[in-house]
Amino acid sequence: MQRQEAWRAWARERGGMSVARVARRALVAAVAVAVAACGGGGGGDDATSNRTLTGAAFGNGMFVLVGREGRILTSADGKTFEPQTSNVEGTVLNGATAAPGTFVVVGDDGTILTSTDAVTWQVESVPTSVSLQSVTFANGTFVAVGYLGTILTSPDGHVWTPRASATTTPLYGVGFGPAGFVAVGGDGVVVTSPDAITWTPGVSNTSATLYAVAFGGGVYVFVGSDGVVGRATDPRLWTTVQQPATTLQGVVFAQSQFVTVGFGGAIFTSPDAVTFTLAKSSTTGYLRAVAFGNGRGVAAGVDGVVQTSTDLVTWTSP
């Protein structure tokens, strides 16, 4: 009781800040200290660095990382990455995905690139000029999302069709699970579709910016600003279940657990998106994306930082 009263008094001294808010700020600081203690490499949090990597994917035996200035890096083992020529060197590339025999990358100014080998890239004709933020492939369909609630679909990555999304809010992430496609974005916006054609709003129960969404272990999971995490078995209705106290921008399901990455080099793992464990990262750089393949996780972020791990517990620079 005395400890609780002392805590309340300390909060009052700081302008009437609530106990919950003070506790949250203390937790944010603790996470930052814990991440920094894990290692010092990898650059800062300058999201405008021309070397910043913003998207990651694995498919066809290849990791693909994309970012600012048209950067595309590829790797078969997740350790040695080779730069490729994107043919859009002045453009920010934001997301990547893979289907059998095809890679697709999306970016600013309505940019969509395709490749059969992740080495030679072709610029596609697209019916939009807005920034495209994320892309996924499932059920024989590519789905790309972006600003102004833009949603495009394609059967092959070459011919794209715009779809009505029921929102004009920016969409930053898109994923797929048994109940269909889910796109997430600003102001807690969630839209869902069973077929990638007809989209309807969902209820996220948060106003946070949502950056990424994934499915695994029977649940959909989204992550976003201020550490918001949501889970749902039906993507039309979500529950906010955990806040790991730092902005999270990427999520993937691998080795029977969710892996999410974000600000300050933070990497968290969770078997159920309810209880989270802080992994050991060797960077304090802002991690923007994460992918998994061939038994290895790869995370990437600002200033070209890359982290890899086989056990998803200890992450190091390749």
Image (cartoon, grey):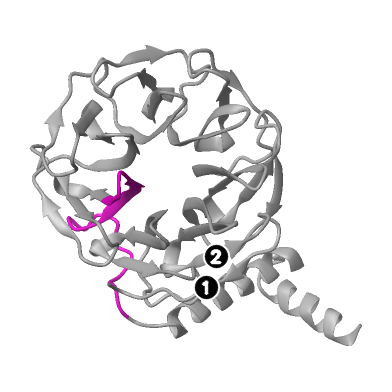
Q: Earlier in the sequence, mark 1 or mark 2?
A: 2
Residue 4: percent from the left, percent from the top? 84, 79
Question: Left or right: where does residue 206 sit relative to residue 66?
Answer: right
In the rendered image, residue 162 lying in the magenta stretch gets the answer: no
Task: Please identify the quadrant where the N terminus is shown.
Answer: bottom right
Q: Which is more toward the observer, 62 or 24?
A: 62
Q: Quadrant of residue 141?
A: top left
Residue designated by label 2: 268
Residue designated by label 1: 279
Residue 76: percent from the left, percent from the top? 25, 57
Q: Quadrant of residue 82?
A: bottom left
Type of amino acid under label 2:
Phe
Q: Residue at x 52, y 73 (%)?
A: 279
Question: Left or right: where does residue 220 sit relative to residue 213?
Answer: right
Q: Residue at x 55, y 56 (%)?
A: 226
Residue 143: percent from the left, percent from the top? 40, 26
Q: Residue at x 49, y 51 (%)?
A: 252
Can residue 209 be seen here? The reply is no
Mark 2, secondary structure of its residue: strand
Question: Left or right: where does residue 35 sit relative to residue 116?
Answer: right
Can residue 229 be seen here? The reply is yes
Residue 111: percent from the left, percent from the top? 21, 30
Tag 1–tag 2 contact (CB < 8 Å): yes
Task: Please identify the quadrant where the C terminus is shown.
Answer: bottom left
User: How many numbered discs?
Assistant: 2
**In this view, 188 is above or below 56:** above
Type of amino acid under label 1:
Ala
User: What's drawn in magenta, residue-wise?
Assistant: 41-64
